[in-house]
Image (tube, coloured by chain):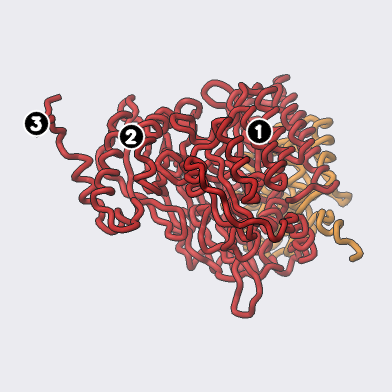
Amino acid sequence: MVETQYRFRSDEPVGDPAVTVDSFGEQTNASAVRIEPGDDARDLLPFLSRIKLVEVNFPGFGDGRGYSAARILREAGYDGELRAVGDVLVDQLSNMRRCGFDSFAPEREINAADAEAALARYAEVYQPTTDGRLPIWAKRHAGK
Amino acid sequence: MYQYDTYDQALVDARVADFRDQTRRRLDGSMSEEQFRPLRLMNGLYLQLHAYMLRVAVPYGTLSSAQMRMLGDIADKYDRGYGHFTTRQNIQYNWIKLDEAPDILADLATVEMHAIQTSGNCIRNTTSDQYAGAAADELVDPRPYAELIRQWSTFHPEFNFLPRKFKIAVIAADTDRAAMRLHDIGVQIVRNAAGELGCAFYVGGGMGRTPMIAPLINGFVPLDQFITYFEACLRVYNRYGRRDNKYKARIKILVHEIGKEAYTSQVEAEFAHLLTQNIEPPIAELERIKAHFADPAFEVGVPDQVDRSDPDFALWVDNNCVTHKQAGYIAATISLKPIGGIPGDASSDQIRLMADLAKEYAFDELRVTHAQNIVLPHVKKADLYALWQKLDAAGLGTANLDQIGDIIACPGLDYCSLANARSIPVAQKISERFAAKAEEIGELKLKISGCINACGHHHAGHIGILGVDRKGVENYQLLLGGSEGADTSLGTITGPGFDEDGVVDAIEKATEVYLAHKQGEERFLDTYRRVGMAPFKEAIYAPKTTQNGEPAHG
């Protein structure tokens, strides 16, 4: 198993193995699940209360379905760990954070200095997502 | 026009630093070309046949004179003294060095410009009507909506790795001058029965190898919900668009395969969900943007006539200028299609001259058109003759808007690594062959693509040309009857293709058929639609005859 390189949470990491979306409903004692690009994240919504870890796999960085999966889970109120795994590259970290990912297990280790710079680079954003950052339009019209 | 505040500027400045860092990592070898490719593409940097090409975004085609001047200066400083205006209202430079690309972005950022998302499988530059804010027939100026879309789509974290590129156009007039229904999403600003403004959404149009005209999926989305509607449209596409075959990955294929009804119902469900997420900018933000697009200080009571005593000038006025909403003003198109020239190219001196003329005569504004020309949107009629004389002296006074010489052409095999055939030499030959007859032929929109990706919009040309590779030889297919206006239609292939000279001959025959069958004020397209393909096909493929009527040999 690939190690988690970055984790932006203070709770204890979940040790349970992640099961597939298809089998998660039947495995009533499972608390970790892995979403592949073709899976529908909404299939997990009935089980959110017992999920502690969702891994979203990026077999190739160019397949962006995992970003929608992450936002859908966060929008539904999921507040457990959301981990991006697979072909996760430094230049995707910031967008993944904004879509709700809070841990990263890249196949190839990311240079720590580059990661820090990438995560800090964009101080302003145009879109509200579930990461809590205020979009530019909210700042422009704050208090009005 | 829109001006950045500190927030907009901060984003663009951060992008310069970001790309400088990415370029550094590529040049020092810590990033592979495979990893760098999508990053540079998302910043408009392509590796072409001979060099890097940089595509700079011109949001909804609007430029200030300071921005235009910078485009000219960049052409001198980093390229070979010219730039190429594109069918998506952008500009491309063809001879860029990778290590200088970050410096170009830094220069652009000083005039509130960038190359963000001008390529890659993300939301591209939003285009619009080149006469926005000037057109007599528009409901409202569409550009504030396009600007709000620009901000929403810039670095949208969910939509950077879509199945394929994504193009949006916004118009606000019934006469469509932006090929709106040939975009992934086309929006028309409309007014409902209650008198409120809203957005009509057309989704799933496009050109490429499977041209499709976008169907209407929602006739009225209120202005305080339309960004949320965009987000719903994009999320459904991001989740369900095909990723198994890049030629079937555009949203038009998804809409076509699952059907307009199924796609629409998925969008509506996602829309209902996203409305609960409060992602819509407040109407106050749209109002803030609208204030930037207030009318310039038009003079009232100025003469509404033009002195037509110079016949060359009168011809240019008739062909290249359109009615303005303000009495005493006119919108003038500068043709970048001189006889025998390269469509859409302008030298650095010409670019700077157009910038100066915009400052002097057009309230500091210019527009890039999707037909690869430049518009000065607000010219006082009393100044028009002086303006034309300066344009004409610089080779910018060609009076051929929408005529056979006003050709749309992609860069083709002279530059593009995707092309199968050259486009530019064909355009040049056509331009020269028909220069003397163009006025008699009248409106004839001719469009050339050098491969099936259709960057030259050949499907939508009254006459379209598609360059293909046939066993290693360039071959040109001819299409008739396409249109991109309110009467959008796709062209039909005449039959077997031609070599470079053969396709020019075939076009000549087509124009002869038109002139022989023309009734009244019919344009080429009208005659074609009335009489059909048969007489054109017959003339184009008739056996060659010698002067005494005998079939020629060889």
Q: Above or below — where is B344 with respect to B299? A: above
Viewer-nearest of discs 2 and 3: 3
Q: Tag 3 or tag 2, which sits nearer the N-term?
A: 2
Residue behind mark 3: B548
Say which of B254 and A8 sits in front.
Answer: B254
Element type at marker 2? strand
One can see residue A2 in this view: no
Rounded to the nearest angstrom, the CA distance separating label 2 from label 3 is: 30 Å
Other residues around mark 3 within 10 Å, as few (<14) / some (14–19) / many (≥20): few
Do marks 1 and 2 share a chain? yes
Query: How many circles with numbers are drawn on the protein?
Result: 3
- Chain A visual colour: orange
Rounded to the nearest angstrom, the CA distance separating label 1 from label 2 is: 36 Å
Res B20 → quadrant: top right
Is there a contact, CB below 8 Å, between mark 3 and mark 1? Answer: no
Quarter of the image with the C terminus of chain B is top left
- Disc 2 marks a residue whose amino acid type is Tyr
Residue behind mark 2: B476
Left or right of A123? Residue B37 is left
Chain assigned red: B
- Disc 3 marks a residue whose amino acid type is Asn
Q: Mark 3 lies on which chain?
A: B
Give the residue displayed 28% in from the left and 57% down from the top. Answer: B519
